[in-house]
Image (cartoon, rainbow, N blue to C red):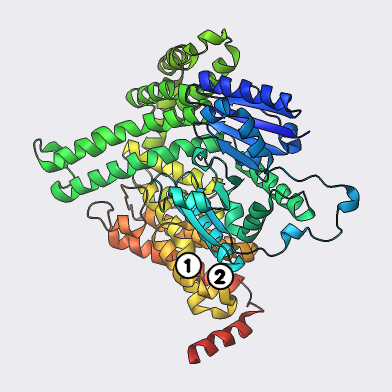
Amino acid sequence: MKRIVAVTACPTGIAHTVMASEALRKTAQALGHQIHVETQGSAGAQHVLSTQEIASADVVILATDIGVDMARFAGKPVYATRTSEAIRNTKGVIEAALTLAPAESSPAAMPNTVPEASAPNTAKQLVAITSCPTGIAHTFMAAEGLQKAAKSLGHSIKVETQGSVGAQNQLNDDDIANADVVIIAADTKVDTARFAGKPVYSTGTKQAMHNGREVIQAALTQPVAASPDYADAVKRAKAERSERRTGPYKHLMTGVSYMLPLVVAGGLAIALAFALGGINAGDNEGTLAAALIQIGGGTAFALFVAVLSAFIAYSIADRPGIAPGLVGGMLAQSLGAGFLGGIVSGFLAGYFTKFLAERIKLPANLEGLKPVLILPFLSTITVGLLMIYVIAPPVQAVLNTLTGWLNSMESANAMLLGVILGAMMAFDMGGPVNKAAYAFAVGLLASQIYTPMAAVMAAGMTPPLGLAIAAFLFKDRFDFEEREARGPALVLGISFITEGAIPFAAKDPLRVIPSLMLGSATAAALSMLWGVQLLVPHGGIFAALIPGAVTNLLLYLVAIVAGAVVTAAAIYVLKRPSAAAPASQNREEKLVTA
């Protein structure tokens, strides 16, 4: 007897979801296996699998027509198919899935050494997908980690990257058909329907970035009985999953990731309008500059609070949360509650819709009314009334106070805010504290407050730039690998990818992180002191060089350089010479001589 857990899901979460669930349950029981089935759809999840059920399962079956979060199944053999296949060929699906299950062995047959499957294998063909909420830093760093690890192990791999910018290097049918295993290294939902019949190994981007070899080895050996190495991999996956379960923070970042394209497009349109028609470009009706102001400020910036609210709600309650989230966000914008009101309305819409989905019970033939009629209607009306009469007035007062304070800041207060935002940006280099400062600055763009955005971007560029400068000037503080990384760190720095500093900080965090915080605080404080304004939230130095996107460009560049220099100087003072530096430096010199 095998223990099976399964997830069935279709867009509505009704017909195919329930039929596939019943077919799997009855067939598995008829074959003598134990099975637990979770159903998912627009109305939320039913019969949710417990941690104990997943941990004890021999195999996971995903019969889905929509994307399903696979993070909780890390380390388990996963068989992916569609609901229609699970309904029509149920026995074949179960039997194919069980071929991935760990083989049973008697105690006498169990060796004391590493299992044979752990020994070096012949070259394998792998395919992978990496994805993070923004689809920028962690997505590509995870892809690079897997590519390097596969090459070092003698395997070939093709990695598709997914994010807010779309999919790149997409896997085709031949890639998938020829693959021995599929690796999903993602912090967001990834649709696995096209990998039906293939062994799928899921983990997070951080594991792929830092432990690429272990990920590939675990993926290739997952059908084998558990061993100490496998147990360690599962333990690491659980710890990583716990890190990712940050609740409200994850929902907020989902909203921000969907909002960013609107903010970028709107900000660049406004910047281009200023470049063509000056600061009063919107006053000259009928001109191209005025049209760009209408597109950027009048439309894109007017929408982004609603989009932020809608996708916070979507992250919490799935599609039934979108309508109340959109309406709540639009009300927040029109009533003057701005991005703060949008955040509140998003969480309110999401959690209230989820509450209704769990509490409202209907006969099976009426369940289809919940996601398209009952949940959106009740939640939209409730959220709308609460926004108008309860939430928007005090939030508007708070936002107006914040806006007035930011607009009237004297130099000392401006510098203090810059120091705080800069230190936050460098503290965890892309983590929750960094993202909190970034989200604060992006939200203020809707209120036409642009100085914090400039400070935050300068502070985010400084850590990799400062480390690269230090690695060039003070070679004895870095080992050979770190000196090899100084060129890429420069590129990541000017591109506003703060995560480029992580490899340096990971080796000596107690000395490197304070140095980064000091440099970023300097850059942000100077940017605030000089009143630099930035209209776009991404792009690094490339966006800053677009005419009209940044004011006081020369002083802005001086602030960034000053922050990088302070970082490098702090590294020199705080970081001790590397014990490996002399030997690796000799090796470097020999390579140059050769």
> Viewed as shown, does residue 239 lie left or right of 356?
right
SS for dot 1: helix
Q: In this view, does 280 lie above or below 313?
A: below
> Farthest residue toward the bottom?
593
Q: Check disc 2: other Cα within 10 Å, few if <14, some if 14-19, many if 20+.
A: many
> Which residue is identified by label 1?
466
Mark closest to the chain's N terminus, 2 or 1 = 1
Q: Residue sitting at 68 percent across and 32 percent down?
A: 5
SS for dot 2: helix
Q: Residue sitting at 58 percent across and 73 percent down?
A: 573
Q: Distance between the residues labelled 2 and 1?
A: 9 Å
Residue 72 in percent (x, y) is at: 64, 39
Q: In this view, does 161 lie above or below 344?
A: below
From the viewer's side, name the closer residue of 346 and 448.
346
User: Pointer 2 and pointer 1: residues touching (CB < 8 Å)?
Assistant: yes
Tell me which amino acid carries mark 1: Gly
From the viewer's side, name the closer residue of 449 and 16.
16
> Viewed as shown, does residue 264 lie left or right of 587?
left
> Farthest residue toward the left?
286
Q: Residue sitting at 70 percent across and 48 percent down?
A: 223
> Which residue is identified by label 2?
571
Residue 305 in percent (x, y) is at: 37, 32
Q: Check disc 1: other Cα within 10 Å, few if <14, some if 14-19, many if 20+.
A: many
> Farthest residue toward the right?
108
Residue 130 in percent (x, y) is at: 51, 50
From the viewer's side, name the closer residue of 511 and 367.
367
> Residue 389 bears which disc, if any?
none
Can residue 405 be seen from the camera position used here?
no
> Viewed as shown, does residue 27 lie left or right of 527?
right
Q: Residue sitting at 41 percent across and 35 percent down?
A: 402
Tell me which amino acid carries mark 2: Ile
> Viewed as shown, does residue 381 lie left or right of 277?
right
